[in-house]
Amino acid sequence: MAPRGLSADEKRVKLLEIFHETKDFYQLKELEKLGPKLKGIVSQSVKEVLQSLVDDGLVQGDKIVFWSFPSHQGAVIQGRVDNAKEMKISQHTQLLEIQQSIEREKSTRIESESRTAAIAKLQYMKKELAKLDEELTAYGACDPVKLEETRRAITLGKEAAMRWTENYSALLPHFLHHSMASIEDIRKYLEIDEEYEDIY
């Protein structure tokens, strides 16, 4: 059975071990040689693993040289822990404020027959409004605004049709005069049948 390759997390740990065990500075090419030799990391994956460590702040570097010391890793982890603690305190404070706000609102909304009736009426009115909206949508074709838009579209369509037929009527004699084609050939080319007539 073939040996199992290293997982992404295992590669990260092992590459970081190279830095921490040697406490030295490395170029990418050096790491690509040391990775397979010392830790069994495939050289083609070293660059990607190194970049993920840099992105997470566990390895520092410029464009050429990279380094990481155990003390820095501890500082990074401690910084994350401190941030998490601050976030927890902030979110706990927010939670308490929200809970207090809910309690205040509850105290101002004392249950009574009139309040219950008002809530029921509100629910009923919302349902009625939804029904009326549906009905209005169904009669949308009769909506005065939509009717006016339709009339305008029809007028514009008719004007465009008249303009094109006028253009055709004006250009047809020009084509006949300047070309050797017959009127039948021009009509056939433009896909205009014998029943065509101008719109006025």
Image (cartoon, grey):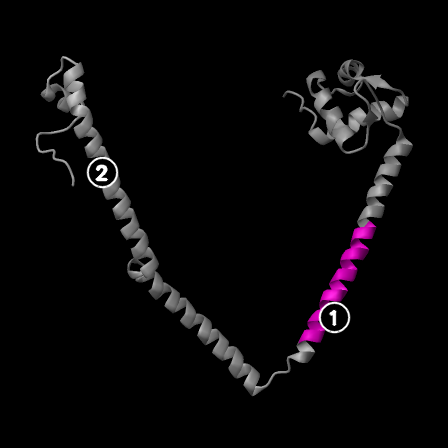
Quadrant (top left, top right, bottom left, bottom right) of the C terminus: top left
**Total marks placed:** 2
Q: Nearer the viewer, mark 1 or mark 2?
A: 2
Mark 2 neighbour density, 10 Å: few (under 14) some (14–19) many (20 or more): some
Image spot of residue 183 (x, y percent): 11, 21
Q: Amino acid at mark 1?
A: Gln
State the residue position of label 2. Answer: 161
Q: Residue at x 10, y 17 (%)?
A: 182
Along the line of sight, the residue nearer the viewer: 68 or 155: 155
Along the line of sight, the residue nearer the viewer: 200 or 45: 200
Seen in the image, is 134 located left or right of residue 126?
A: left
Residue 170 sits inside the magenta stretch: no
Mark 1 neighbour density, 10 Å: few (under 14) some (14–19) many (20 or more): few
- Kindly give the residue lying farthest to the bottom in the view shown: 113
Q: Residue at x 86, y 27 (%)?
A: 68
Find the magenta span and give its range.
85-105
State the residue position of label 1. Answer: 100
Along the line of sight, the residue nearer the viewer: 26 or 13: 26
Indicate whether 155 appears above or below 139. above
Q: Residue at x 64, y 82 (%)?
A: 110
Q: Amino acid at mark 2?
A: Ala
Seen in the image, is 28 located left or right of residue 71?
A: left
Residue 89 sits inside the magenta stretch: yes
Indicate whether 161 appears above or below 148. above
Dot label at residue 183: none
Query: Magenta segment, principal secondary structure?
Result: helix
Q: Secondary structure at mark 2?
A: helix
Image spot of residue 190 (x, y percent): 18, 25
Image spot of residue 84 (x, y percent): 80, 48
Q: Residue at x 8, y 30 (%)?
A: 194
